[in-house]
Image (cartoon, rainbow, N blue to C red):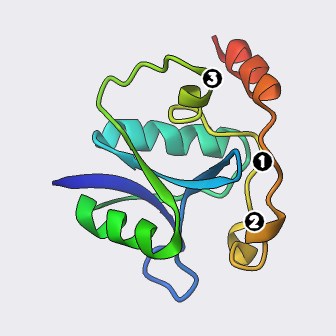
Amino acid sequence: MNIYVLLYNSGTDKEGIHSIELKGRTIVLMFEDKDDATRYCGLLEAQDFPLPTVEMIDIEEIREFCIKLDYECKLVEKNFVPKTSEDRLLISPPQKNLEVENWEENVDNQAKIDINTIKENLEKLL
């Protein structure tokens, strides 16, 4: 099965995959629908994050990648409706992210997500 992921610096030596940090876990987002992935990119750009590209890839390749690095992967299904505040992070990015150029150097320094701030910002979008 093919899914869509968000890549930074695609095809370069500094290529990186978009992920979120949640309760000390690194989660790679996989989108079933390309439009959902593109919409997420737009939300990142609106928050002044660097714009990733949407790339189609086999789901098993991402799962193997995540297992190898002790990451989790989460499939955002088409027409996904969040049920919890954590689920909302799957359709709207957190406010803070690692710098694309230094993502490898900063893995251990990533800030914890403040769920209340994210909730407030999501409410402002509505």
- How far is the residue under mark 3 from the one under mark 2? 24 Å
- How far is the residue under mark 3 from the one under mark 1? 16 Å
- Secondary structure at badge 3 equals helix
Horizontal and vertical percent for residue 122?
A: 68, 20
Residue at 73% of width from left, 69% of height from top? Answer: 107
Query: Mark on residue 96?
Result: 1
Q: Quadrant of the C terminus?
A: top right
Residue 105: quarter of image: bottom right
- Secondary structure at badge 1 equals loop
Q: Amino acid at mark 3?
A: Ser
Query: Which residue carries the number 3 mark?
Result: 85
Disc 3 or 1, which lies upstream in sequence? Answer: 3
User: Vertical placement of 42 versus 7: above or below?
Assistant: above
Residue 106 lies left or right of residue 19; in this view the side is right
In the image, farthest residue toward the bottom: 13
Q: Amino acid at mark 1?
A: Lys
Residue 104 lies left or right of residue 52; in this view the side is right
Residue at 55% of width from left, 58% of height from top? Answer: 18
User: Vertical placement of 103 versus 88: above or below?
Assistant: below
Query: Which residue carries the number 2 mark?
Result: 99
Mark 3 or 1: in front is 3
Horizontal and vertical percent for residue 48?
A: 73, 47
Residue at 84% of width from left, 65% of height from top? Answer: 109
